[in-house]
Image (cartoon, grey):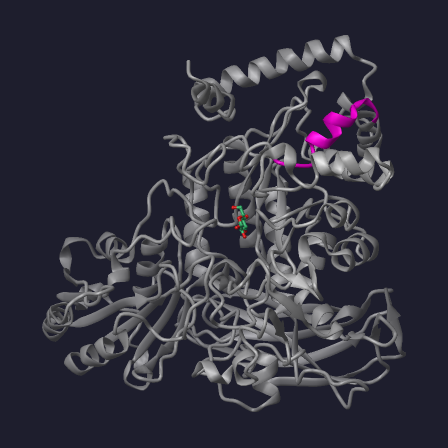
Amino acid sequence: MTSSQQTANEFRRPGVSAGRKLIRISILFIFFAIFRSVAADLPYLDPKRPLDTRVEDLLGRLTLEEKISLLHADSKFTTAAVPRLGISRRWLDDGPHGVREDIGPDTWNPAGRTDDFATAMPAGICLAATWNPELGFKEGEAIGQEARWRGKDIMLGPGVNILRTPLCGRNFEYLGEDPFLSGVMCSGYIRGEQSMDVASCVKHFALNNQEYERGTINVEVDERALRELYLPAFKAAVQSGGVWCVMGAYNQLRHQHCCHNDYLLNKILKEEWGFQGLVMSDWGGTHDARQAAGNGLDLEMGSDKPYDQYYLAQPYVAGLKAGAFPMAGLDEKVRRNLRVMLATHVLDADRKQGSINTAAHQTVARQVAEEGIVLLKNENHILPLNANKLKTIAVIGQNATRLHAHGGDSSGIKAFYEIPPLQGLVNRVGANVNIVFSEGYRKNGGADLAERAVAAARTADVVIYIGGLNHDKGLDCEGADRKDMKLPCGQDALIQRIIAANPMTVVVLEGTMVEMDAWLAKVPALLQAWYPGIEGGNALARVLFGDVNPSGKLPATFPKKLADSPAHALGDYPGRNGTVTYAEGLLVGYRWFDAKSIEPQFPFGYGLSYTTFKYSNLKLRAANSTNLVATAQFEVENTGTAFGAEVAQLYVHEKNPRLMRPERELKGFQKVLLKPGESKTVTIPLEAAAFAFYDDRQKTWVVEKNTFTIGVGSSSRDLPLTADFQTAKTIVLK
Ligand code: BGC
């Protein structure tokens, strides 16, 4: 056996085939039984003891070298084992859309396994568009099950960086522009994933809002925008999701890299928010031994050095031995690593084993896509289509057949299978309808492609155009931002020609937001399908033919043109001389469009249905428990003829605030399922945080004694119900 084979074998992860899994479980049981009886007095092995007792006991048994080995990688995605104490190698993996194929051990090349196919969930932005935290839980749970089956301990997701510019190459991975929506959705996901004995790792903390110069760019942001926009989703991940790991961002905040940023990690995350888990670096995001030692980093991954030369390896040991770094700091880092390990039951015999590529996981993927697809336009009810009335459908556009799940870089998945839209449509309509496919456009494609597509459009009863973006570098892909917000490959012109040839054209766009002015007015129907995952084609077909009534809502404003969005209107994207200043402050996304009265193409929270909903009877009641300030109660009625789900949204506006506040901010929502004619009462609790702003002079959150207007409705720009609420007194929050 060559040494490289030896290495590869050492890196065979546990638990991948059913047979091997059974053997592994039996061995584990025997091992634990023997280990227990021999070492009945080893508290760290006793699952009945309190977590911290176990942690402290284990910590006390580790040598200096063993402690250090837990603080840095020993391959691309693992940390070393401590066999003497029964600690196996820890396996990390991306995240956030499923369990990534195995890499390395020491390169970015695939490990070449045949057992690492997984369920590719829809992209994060599609999950956010469902506005359904229960689906977030289900998705997290399914990914957690697959992670366990693949022997993973920590999953690198979800990603919750706020969409500041439409151009950010990773917007598709994240949960949109609103901190409240991102916080609620990521908490559900984390709770689901961690319920499977695997730790989630929320990323990238913080302000990784562009890919351009991501490893070096210094972000200057005012304290209020930091606290009110860029941090709340992380805070929710910690305090409501109970996340066990946080990944630092590549960029700098106020001239200190985020992976060892004292303010972010020590002061805010650990001291203020009480985070008990571990902070890991992004891959290659560590730059300095002193800062790594003292500024809150607990696990260093992906540095471009031999593993023993990582900042938290030999340089750290040297500093500890020289007395430059305190031993207590070392113990604190190790303690956090051990806490995550023990909390996810890595040393317990009954740790959950998971499952992979199950029908249940595929159903979750389909549900997320079905609920995340957003119907943006539907003139004259051209949708849903009726297969019985159609003879020929022209399906046009490269995305009709293009697979996306593997793309986008670190979030890509080696999908067990992937149903692209064309296949989904064929599955749905069967042999009764003739489907003609024409690619229409392609990178560097010739004019003949468009000619053929237009000819196909002309003879069809209906055209379903499936275009948009893809994961090519420079589009929706990690490592670079988009250059503009336009559709690539001449699609604007192509869509116009298709509509001219056949006005019965439904446009479906995959990917993130693009400019649409060239053709939108002429198109009768438009759907935003994001990257809808392994079951995306089936989900899309079910929406188009009305088996599913669309209920997705935009998790980000779609501007008419790039220059309308704040980072571009103020001209400070992508920064100058290595620094980007967030000059728009609090006015990100709809907050900007509202403040400047700019008409967006489609507003935040927008999305149509095949039925209609009526809102009525808003009542606000003061509550007297400590955190709950009020409850909002109102009725939503399905006034149409189809079963449907409505995302009822609640926005808060403060009248004449002491400090500037956005016109309105999302502070509550609920997805309501309604039969035709049915009416339901929706109750949304409003905690103090719903009324609070960050007072940067007092350095705390404050709810003022004042009048607040509560707006309720179906999008940030459609709030038929409003009522005023008076807070009883000024409250200072922690
Ligand atoms: C990305 C992270 C990812 C890590 C490991 C980095 O380049 O920014 O999101 O988890 O690689 O693949």
In the picture, which quadrant includes the N terminus? top left
- Please state the horizontal and vertical placement of residue 372, each as a whole percent of the image: 45, 62
Residue 693 to residue 265: above or below: below
From the viewer's side, name the closer residue of 316 and 186.
Answer: 316
User: Is 64 inside the magenta-drawn segment?
Assistant: yes
Q: Quadrant of residue 540?
A: bottom left
Q: Residue at x 59, y 32 (%)?
A: 74
Q: Residue at x 18, y 83 (%)?
A: 500
In the picture, which quadrant includes the C terminus? bottom right
User: Is 595 inside the magenta-drawn segment?
Assistant: no
- Please state the horizontal and vertical placement of residue 19, each as a whole percent of the image: 44, 18
Residue 192 to residue 600: above or below: above
The magenta segment? 60-73
Is residue 503 at least partly visible in the picture?
no
From the viewer's side, name the closer residue of 204 and 291.
Answer: 291
Q: Residue at x 87, y 38 (%)?
A: 323
